[in-house]
Image: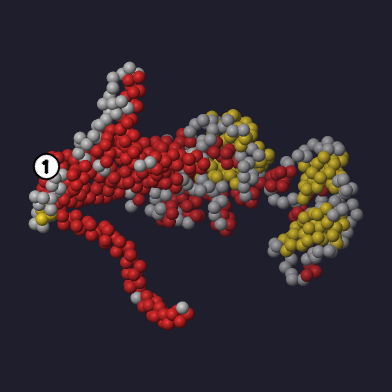
Amino acid sequence: MKNGIAVDLRNVVKRFAEVYAVDHVSMQIRDGEFFSMLGPSGCGKTTTLRMIAGFEFPTAGEIALHGKLVGTTPPFRRNVNTVFQSYALFPHMTVAENVAFGLQMKKTPQAEIARRVEEALDLVRLGGFSGRRPRQLSGGQQQRVALARALVNHPEVLLLDEPLGALDLKLRKEMQLELKSLQERVGITFIYVTHDQEEALTMSDRIAVMNAGKVLQVGTPTEIYERPVCRFVADFIGETNFIEGLAGGVEPDGVATITTDDGLTFRAQTTRPVTPGAKVTLSIRPEKAFLAVQSPPPGTPNCFPVTVARVAYIGSDTRIDVRLGQGRLFDLWEQNSRSTLDRDAYWQPGETGFLWWPAENALVLTE
Amino acid sequence: MALETLTSEPRESRVAALLRRSERFRLGLLLFPGLFWLLLFFALPLVVVVLYSFATPGPTGRVEWHFTLANYGTLFTESLYVNAYLRSIWAGVLTTLICLLAGYPLALYIVRRPPRWRTVLLFLILIPFWTNFLVRTYAWMIILSNNGIINSIIQALGLPRVALYPSEGAVLIGLIYGNLPFMVLPIFASLDRFDFTLLEAAADLGADQTRAFLRVMLPLTMPGIAAGSVLVFIPTVGQFVVSDLLGGAKVDYLGNLLQRLFTRSNPPNWPLGSAMAIVFMAVLTVAILLYFRITTEQDR
């Protein structure tokens, strides 16, 4: 089964009344990968997850689990388990009883249940907690019980619906790393739903970015961040400056010239064919642009004299808003790689300088 | 006025100091109204009833204070009383059971409606309570009688009439009708607190609907079932009005005998009635303790 397709979504549609919650989604989730569905609330990621679990049935399209069509198979006949956002632990059962529930339903022999429950609790480092009730545990511990309760069944696919949403920031970061290493140890396919881009980038092998019921891009975290295919993805993942303009010619190395209506000319990387004269958007991330005191050598691309408008020192970086052209604001981040209290080492509002970036640091978006 | 306030002030603070010094005294003072109430209106009458139950009935209905166990003896030997106990308890069990079987799905249905509809439906359940209970029971007489609505329909269909009223069946219908809301409301409350995601979790872990219900929903709504059952069972076992009206005063339930012993028989027999009430209370207490023992098993 390794390197096969764990979940295959083919043109899946889910309509509630007249609203398309999931609008013709097709994607393939590989065996053993950590796959995230990322998007704002209402983008259809949770509905997609619920269809894979069997809590909802698609209005149209097909879902296959390891090649087997499961369109209208009820959840209790799918070898898929879910970690719920609210954990949904059974409050009247002990931790061990919660974890044993799935195995009992499958009529597993008593001795094997005991052994596997213990194994699962050890896996999530809750060895001594089997006799406790869920309400006697902290949020993080409940979270781990929910994980153990799902993993003990050795599911084909583990579905996680914003499982870290209820935890505080520090615990969330710890659990992110723990989840990732757990997934690598057990080798089970994880499908993870989140609206937190950092979470998705940290843990995932691949990410599907969704909006308004559609999948906009599927790719590795690097691909999603460095080569977004559209404006929505570039905007949703990380931060960026958008500059709208008209495309000029594209050179053989893929660098295009873009002219704005206030007369600025930029050079940027294209990843898709661009028709000369088309309206395009240029995306340049704040950490990929630079601010120089002195004018860079002539011939430096994308070089503009600017005035510093605002400066925010945030510790690791200084975030600087500069004004270029006719008052257009541009955001750039400078890493504070030198430790100093010297005021002159930092930009101050009102100072002038030169903004520049290499052409390959900016991206031409056609959508 | 001002002078009064001034002079009374030191005394007040002395009382306050006393209160602060003696935690026990303060507690006693706070408990006093409640305790007094309970003693006067609950414990005292109970003591009186217990004393009566060991007294001898006089020839004119006056109570004579000679200690005797004869009252209790009568209760356990004369079939009239034994049967009344059994019949009442049986009616109580049956009513509770049917109310539970009808009330649980009804409560579940209401809980799953959108909030606006829930309010409307709960309201509909409560509306009959605005009419006097007697009037509602008379209504059932009209529905069930020989020339009543049901028999009219049966006749219109060309079928022979059925003697529905008065009968023990009619009593049961009246009891179920009158008590159903007391079952629905507590179950509704416990279902309202129930997290329905737990059913999805159970299904996700391989439980079909039946097992998800038995293993997750039923145990978690048990407090509502227990409360509803007690609320239905106790008044049903002790009632006398419904059996009087819908049973045609032909069969004796506990309540009817009690009523007769205290007020209608000539001469009245208060000691026997008291003994009957005490046994009744003992039976109910044991039944309820047992019931709670069973229904809250999982929580211990």
Q: Nearer the viewer, residue B127 or A347?
A: B127
Q: Position of residue A101 (x, y in %)?
A: 41, 43
Q: Is residue B247 above or below residue B49?
A: above
Label 1 is placed on what type of residue? Glu
Residue B15 is left or right of residue A286, and the answer is: left
For residue B67, side relative to residue A355 (left or right): left
Quadrant for residue B13, please give it: bottom left
In percent of the image, x 53 and y 42: which residue is there? A159
Relative to A59, is B260 above or below?
A: below
Q: Residues within 10 Å of mark 1 (few under 14, many from 20)?
A: few
- State the residue at coordinates (56%, 57%): A168
Image coordinates of residue B9 in percent, x first then y, are: 43, 80
Residue B25 is at least partly visible in this image:
yes
Kindly state the secondary structure of the residue where label 1 is placed.
loop
Whole-percent x, y for residue A233 in the image: 70, 44
- Tell me the residue at 84%/46% (across/down): A267
Applied colour scheme: secondary structure
| Residue ID for mark 1 | B78
Q: Residue furthest right?
A: A298
- The foreground one among B223 and B211 is B223
The residue located at (75%, 59%) in the rendering is A319
Looking at the picture, how far across and down is residue B42, in whole percent? 26, 57
Side of A22 where A232 appears, left or right: right
Q: Residue furthest top?
A: B158
* Subunit ID for the residue under disc 1: B
Is A139 situated left or right of A277 in this image?
Answer: left
Q: Is residue B107 at all visible to an observer of this figure?
A: no
Check the image and report above or below for A165 versus B109: below
